[in-house]
């Protein structure tokens, strides 16, 4: 068996593919196909008077962490809310899900 296809606690196998299951605080646990990934939730927009380098870093520079990561997910086929998900990038275990501040 291909080790990349071994299901972990955060993923389940559906329709022959591995799928993330996200526990939406409004709708309950749903398959990842109902969501759209929104990017790194730890990045904050610079102040309006920040210089170009700060905006360039905001737009283009991202870390690629191996471990816990905060990310935005939009529940497009459910409550249509932005959720902040804390997920382990290796095991895909989801530690917490909260609504947008
Ligand atoms: Zn939802």
Image: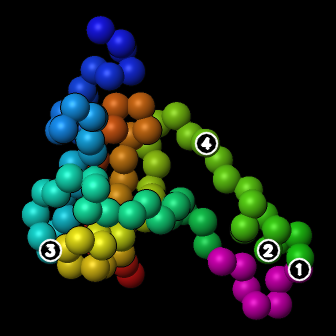
Mark-to-mark CA distance, 4 and 1: 25 Å
Instruction: Name the residue at the right extreme.
Output: 52
**Distance between the Cα atoms at labels 4 and 2?**
19 Å
Which segment is the magenta one? 45-51
Asked whether residue 96 is in view, the answer is: no
Q: Is residue 46 magenta?
A: yes
Q: Secondary structure at mark 4?
A: loop
Q: Earlier in the sequence, mark 4 or mark 2?
A: 2
- The numbered mark, 4 or 3, whose residue comes first in the sequence reads 3
Q: Is mark 3 within 8 Å of ligand 1?
A: yes
Element marked by disc 1: loop
Query: Alpha carbon of mark 2 to alpha carbon of mark 3: how far?
Result: 34 Å
The residue tagged 3 is 26
Tell me how far mark 1 sits from mark 3, CA to CA. Answer: 39 Å
- Count residues near mark 4 (Cα–Cα under 10 Å), then give few for <14, some for 14-19, many for 20+: few
Q: Is there a contact, CB below 8 Å, between mark 1 and mark 2?
A: yes
- 17 or 96: nearer the viewer: 17
Q: Residue at x 30, y 73 (%)?
A: 76
Query: Which residue bears the numbered disc 2?
Result: 55
Residue at numbered disc 1: 51
Residue denoted by label 4: 64
């Amino acid at each position: 068996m291909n080790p990349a296809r071994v299901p972990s606690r955060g993923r389940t196998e559906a329709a022959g593919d591995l799928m993330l299951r996200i526990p939406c605080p409004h709708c309950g646990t749903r398959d990842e196909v109902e969501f759209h990934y929104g990017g790194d939730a730890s990045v904050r927009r610079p102040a309006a008077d920040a210089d170009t380098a700060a905006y360039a870093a905001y737009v283009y520079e991202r870390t690629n962490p191996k471990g816990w990561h905060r990310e935005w997910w939009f529940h497009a086929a459910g409550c249509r809310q932005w959720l902040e998900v804390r997920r382990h990038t290796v095991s895909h275990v989801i530690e917490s899900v909260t609504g947008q501040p």
